[in-house]
Structures are given as C-alpha cells and as structure tokens.
Amino acid sequence: MFDDTIAAIATPLGEGGLAVVRVSGPQSLEVADKIFQPVGEKSVKPSGAPTHTIHFGKIVRDGKKIDEVLLAVLRAPRTFTREDTIEISCHGGILPAKLVLDSILQAGARLAEPGEFTRRAFLSGRIDLAQAEAVADLIHSRTELALVAANEQLAGKLSQRINQLRDDLMKILAHIEAHIDFPDEDISPDTKEKLLQRLEDGISFMDELLRTANEGQILRRGIRAAIVGRPNAGKSSLLNQLLGHDRAIVSPIAGTTRDTIEETANIRGLPVVFIDTAGLREGRDEIEVEGIRRSRESLAKAELILHILDSSKPFTPDDEKYFAEFAGKKSILVCNKSDQSRKLILPQEVTARCPVITDISCLSGQGIEALKDAIKNLVWAGKIESGMLHVMINSRHQEALGRAREATLRTLDALRAQATLELVALDLRIGVNAVGEIVGKTTTEDLLDSIFSQFCIGK
C-alpha cells in the first residue's frame, strides 16, 4: 500500500552501547543489500535471508567501512508495519548511528516523519487508532500503573469495548433503515421498546467509559502540584523530600528560589509533577520579581496546591490571603518544621477548607509518607484496582464519546417522540461515526496528522 521506504534512528540520540536504525517499506531488502556486507562463509545478502533472522556484517558506504553491525531481516507481513523491515543494531553514539542512517538514505530510503512507522501499522490494519495511541502512552509511561494501562490498551482491551458499542449501534441503525426502505411496515410497539432499551444501554455504557477519563488523564500526563508559601517556609526542602533526592537548593536565606523548578515523582503509583515556586511576597529585585511572576503562572496551571506553612511562626494575614487566592483549587495544608517550637495556630475556617498534614519535618522526613497518602487520596478517590486499568479513555476519546452520547440521546428522544425515521437514523449515524473515530474506523487526514505528529521519530 506504500510505494516508498522510510528509515530513522529508533533509539534516543546520545552515547550508549547500541543504537538501532529501522527501515520499513517495499525496498527495504534492496536498500539493505546496497550497504550491508555479510561476514562469514555461509553468509547471505539480506534479500536472500529467511525472515526473522539476524546477520553479522559491515555497513559500507562509498567503499568505506562505517561500522560492524547486526542486521535483522523481518519480512512482511509478520512485522510491526506489515511491510518488509530491516533493523540494524550498530554501536551507540551520535556519529555511528547518523552515518548508518545516511548510508540508508543514500541507498534509496527517505527519512521517516514522526510516528510514521506506527502510522503505517495503523493504515495496514496491524493495529487500530486506540492501540496506536497506546504505543505513545507506553513510551511516555512514568509509573508502573501507567505502563499497565498502556499495555492493556495496546492489547486491545479498550478497542474491544468500543467495537462492541459501535456494532450494537450499527445493528440498531440497520433496523431503523430497514423500516425506512419499507415504509408500509411500521415499527411494532414491542420492537420499538427493545430499540429504546438498546439505545439506553448504549448511553449507559458510554457513561461508564466517560467516568474513566479523569483517571486516564492522570495516569498519562500526571497531575501538576505547586508547592507555595511564604519565603523560607521549606518549599524546596519539601520538594527534595518528595523526590527522594536533592533537586532544589536549600538555604536559610529567604528568596533563594528565583525560578520555578519542575520534577516528576511517583506518588503511590501516580505521576505527580511537583513545581517548586519562588516565595510569594513583594520582589526585592528584578530577578525575584520575575521568579514570582513565573510562580503565579505555574500556580494558574496547577491542579493541586501544597500550601506549606512554618509551624514555628504564627499564622499571618499573608497566609490568609494566599488561602483565599487558591480557594478554587484542590489544596493540602502542610505544616513544616514540627521539630521546632510550635507557634502556628490555624483558624477553623482554614482547616475546614482542605486536608491538613501536621507534624511535618522536611529536615528529617517525618510525615512525608502521610503527605503522599493525602496527595493520592485527593486526586484519586478509592483504591487503585488492577481491573480499573483495563479501559481508560484519553481526552480525544472523551470528546468523541461525548458527541456520540449527545447524538444517541437525540436518537432516543426522536424515537420516543415518533419523529420521522430519517431524522432518527441521521442522529444515530452521527453517533456511530463518532464512536468509530476512537478506533479509526472513521478518520480524516487532519486527525491522523494531529495524533502521529506527537510521536517521536523512529516510532
């Protein structure tokens, strides 16, 4: 289905033991024959090698040896793209991999676009669109739970449910269209009730899937948690404790943090992006003013606020002002410096707004585990069950299912109101197409470009 051959480095750039260069397309074997010299008495050229075999040899360009490599021959259709594929394992490092890739391009292949190998796998029917997205989720997984969820989607667990939903709606649509073709035959009351029940079941099923969207997005991209408070309250120390290593500079001098620092940590299986911000106060110089401005930008994007207070100092009007400023966001109050004499007394109206973690010492690590539990409980209600990871939709699936649900509701209302069957079928067809978008049974070039442009080159 493709008349050209693509190639790219499939491993990250940089120094390493090995690098892999991938080639896919109808001329893959021919390209490999031009640059690969097998070594050994019984060695063969790639075009003469059996499928799924590995061969030792040299990459040669203009008569000069580039590198000693292992070359894998993978013949269609038993490949990721269902095309003839060559994978070359060469020595790691920017230059060896680049020279091998340059040799392949000179021999007739072209440089692959981001996500083009996975796109070809989708277009060839090897995987559907939801599974293709799972490939990217797998690569970007930052916790074991995210990895499990991506693997479940890649295995087709979500696709099975979406295809079942689409098939059910298609059968209802076919039933309605059959009555359109034979207008003399009215839909009997019993049949109509069955159709209404099946539409209601479809809507309930969509609601069930839509409820997984929030958790799915948390696992895929994490949740942004900003650490805020007055200068020298212990924000950077708290970040270091949550990460398990020293990432931010800690100093008793107020205003040490001049810029925002972002790091991701695994908190009870959930990826949390912690943002250490500059202390909120009036800046004393241009650099601190800019740091505070950036802090407020980060705070606007944060979904969770960790408001840290110094237990050795009284509650101040500035603290109350910050509480009011972040009243619309999920928050946890962290009382630091429990190892010092306590002077902090929290107003009841403050403690009623959000969870409070007392007895925290960022110096010794005391109370950090309790804080991690509080973070997990605030962003993910209940226990994380393995069965929950089987089906978790992303934002694109959520938008498509939302449109499908609205169209199915209109179908339901129209059928109950005895509207003309042509109008009933029109809305239901919109719903079927929206569901089909999730697995790629209804796609546009713009949609595919949008999805696969987010992939790395070589995947």
Image (cartoon, grey):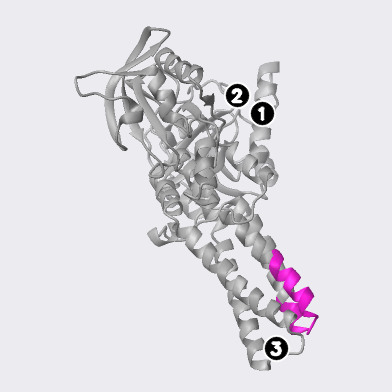
Say what secondary structure mark 2 lies in: loop
Q: Residue furthest front?
A: 48
Other-residue count near label 3 (Cα within 10 Å), few / some / many at <14 / 14–19 / ≥20: some
- Residue 357: x, y in percent? 48, 48
At x 60%, y 28%, the residue is 278
- Residue 151: x, y in percent? 41, 50
Reading the image, the residue beneath label 3 is 187
Circle 1: residue type: Arg
Which segment is the magenta one?
412-430
First in sequence, mark 1 or 2: give its number.
Answer: 2
- Residue 376: x, y in percent? 46, 51
Can see residue 314?
no
Residue 211 location, quadrant: bottom right
Can see residue 187?
yes
Toward the viewer: 3 or 16? 3
Reading the image, the residue beneath label 2 is 259
First in sequence, mark 1 or 3: give its number.
Answer: 3
Say what secondary structure mark 1 lies in: helix
Say what secondary structure mark 3 lies in: loop
Circle 2: residue type: Asp
At x 56%, y 69%, the residue is 167
Nearer to us of marks 1 and 3 is: 3
Q: Vertical placement of 292 versus 309: above or below?
A: above
Reading the image, the residue beneath label 1 is 294
